[in-house]
Amino acid sequence: MHSISERAAAYLEKVPPAIAGSGGHAATFNAAAVLVRGFAMPEADAFPLFMAWNQTHCQPPWSESELRHKLNSAANSTRPLGYLLND
């Protein structure tokens, strides 16, 4: 059985890239929500995974402060907490 972090990292690999001018904000917010709402990860645990995804899936990559803001916003979203834990 894989850890939540391993499962979340594998899931992020399948999340579409975030491209500026082509829905990049929504794609990045979705990735943040996957971590903090879908896998119910604390923001501190989610951040390294989110930062790694940012480097490989975002054009151009977001700044650290922008990523932290997106994680915080996603944590306060109305998506059900833990909705990906049983998948």
Image (cartoon, grey):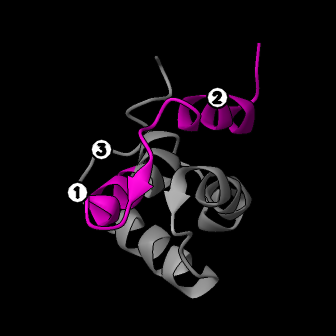
Residue 45 in the magenta stretch? The answer is: no
Q: Select label 2 or label 3 by which is in front.
A: 2
Tell me the crowding category of disc 2: few under 14, some 14 to 19, or many 20 or more residues within 10 angstroms, Cα based: few
Would you say the residues marked 2 and 1 are in contact, meaning their CB atoms lie under 8 Å apart? no
Q: Is residue 34 above or below residue 83?
A: below
Farthest residue to the bottom: give it: 65
Q: Select label 2 or label 1 by which is in front.
A: 2
| Residue 33 picture location, percent across and down | 40, 53
Tell me the crowding category of disc 1: few under 14, some 14 to 19, or many 20 or more residues within 10 angstroms, Cα based: few
Question: Which range is magenta?
Answer: 1-30
Q: Label 1, label 3: how many angstroms apart (C-alpha)?
A: 6 Å
Residue tagged by mark 3? 80
Q: Going 70% across and 55% down the picture, which residue do you hit?
A: 52
As helix, strand or loop, the secondary structure at mark 3 comes to loop
Would you say the residues marked 2 and 3 are in contact, meaning their CB atoms lie under 8 Å apart? no
Residue 18 in the magenta stretch? The answer is: yes
Q: Is residue 7 above or below residue 73?
A: above
Residue tagged by mark 1? 78
Q: Dividing the picture into quarters, in which one does residue 44 lie? A: bottom right
Q: Going 61% across and 36% down the picture, which residue do you hit?
A: 8
Return the disc, 2 or 1, that comes first in the chain's sequence.
2
Return the disc, 2 or 3, that comes first in the chain's sequence.
2
Tally of marks: 3
Instruction: State left or right for residue 39 relative to residue 80.
Output: right
Q: Is residue 48 above or below residue 53?
A: below
Q: Dividing the picture into quarters, in which one does residue 29 lie? A: bottom left
Three-letter amino acid code of the residue under disc 3: Pro
Three-letter amino acid code of the residue under disc 1: Thr
| Residue 50 picture location, percent across and down | 61, 57
Three-letter amino acid code of the residue under disc 2: Ala
Farthest residue to the top: give it: 1
Residue tagged by mark 2? 10
